[in-house]
Every structure is written in C-alpha cells, then in structure tokens.
Image (cartoon, rainbow, N blue to C red):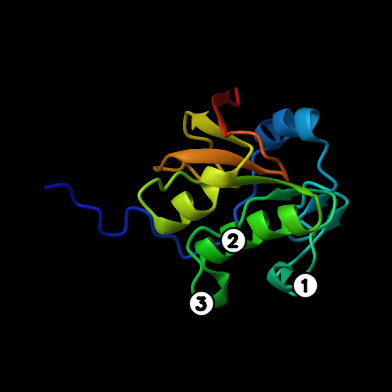
C-alpha cells in the first residue's frame, strides 16, 4: 500500500507561480487582478493580499488565482473554488485558477464541472524557491459566465 503521510503537506501556503507558467496564460487571458498574492509575488498590478481577505471582496475583471492549497477553516480550497465560480457568474467576470486536480472531491464536481475550460497541466512546475515540482496533478480552470460546455485541453507550460 502506498504511503501518503505528509506527501501533500506544506507548512508554507504562499508559493510564487513560475513566471513562465503565468506569462503563457496571461497572453491568452490578459489578467487584471491577482486574487491571492502579496507585493512580492503578485502577477498583476492590482492584487488582494492576505490582509485584504479576497474571500470577502467582489472579483471584477479578469482574475488570476493561485490560492493556498492547504488552507483550513474559511481559507479551505473548496471555499476558493466556490468563490471563483460565484464571482464569475455574479459579475460576468473571468477567473483563471491554478489548482490541484482533485477529481474525486465534491467541490470538483459541484463547481469545476461548470467551468468554461479546464486545462490539465503537463509536467510538474516548480513554485517559488521549491527544489522540486509539485507532486500532485494540477489544472487551470477558467470560470466565465457561459452556457457552453466544458472544454478540456492540455497545458504545457514549457
């Protein structure tokens, strides 16, 4: 039996998205606000920091979101996914979200399957000063107000 103890844990929740990764997406989406950042790792001129508490704000425009993956309480990953979907519908906004592809979770099926597009990430990008790429599958999920079906593609960030 596989040992998963600690495999997906991290004491750190703020990981900088690799520039090559974001830049390739930004050419397509033209993000205007980073929804979970700080002044050292933001990808957009406008951003919400931990102190701003993005989960309590309105998300308008084209948002980039690489949320904390292991948050607890209000900061749980499922709350970020729900908020991204809700804000895209409420404000006719776009949210481009980088998140673990946890296809066995309730929130994946409740929200991700309503996305306009899901890009399954090929490879293991290295975040911030990490020595190794993230050991779990990732996906880019694009929420937009639409009646179109979900489009699933591959995203090769290299």
Of residue 16 and residue 109, the one placed in the foreground of this image is 109
Q: Percent x, y for residue 101?
A: 45, 44
Which residue is the site of mark 1?
52
Mark nearer the N terminus (3 vs 1): 1
Residue at image x 39%, y 54%?
A: 105
Q: Is disc 1 surrounded by few (<14), some (14 to 19) or many (20+) residues within 10 Å?
A: some
Identify the disc placed on residue 73: 3
In the image, which is nearer the foreground, mark 2 or mark 3? 2
Q: Percent x, y for residue 87?
A: 73, 59
Of residue 138 and residue 21, the one placed in the foreground of this image is 138
SS class of the residue under badge 2?
Answer: helix
Mark nearer the N terminus (1 vs 2): 1
In the image, which is nearer the foreground, mark 1 or mark 2? 2
| Residue 108 in sight in this render | yes
Residue 68 vs 28, above or below: the answer is below
Residue 146 placement, left or right of 105: right
Residue at image x 64%, y 49%?
A: 16
Identify the disc placed on residue 78: none
Q: Percent x, y for residue 150?
A: 57, 34
């Amino acid at each position: 039996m596989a040992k998963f103890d600690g495999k997906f844990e991290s004491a750190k929740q703020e990981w900088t998205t690799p520039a090559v990764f974001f830049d390739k997406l930004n050419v397509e989406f033209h993000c205007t606000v980073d929804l979970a950042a700080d002044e050292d790792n933001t990808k957009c001129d406008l951003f919400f920091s931990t102190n701003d508490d993005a989960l309590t704000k309105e998300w308008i425009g084209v948002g980039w979101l690489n949320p904390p993956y292991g948050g607890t309480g209000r900061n749980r990953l499922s709350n970020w996914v729900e908020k991204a979907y809700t804000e895209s519908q409420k404000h006719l906004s776009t949210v481009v979200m980088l998140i673990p592809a946890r296809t066995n979770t309730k929130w994946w099926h409740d929200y991700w399957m309503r996305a306009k597009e899901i890009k399954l990430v090929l490879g293991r990008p290295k975040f911030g000063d990490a020595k190794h790429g993230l050991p779990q599958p990732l996906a880019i999920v694009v929420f937009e107000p639409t009646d179109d079906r979900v489009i699933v593609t591959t995203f090769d960030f290299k």
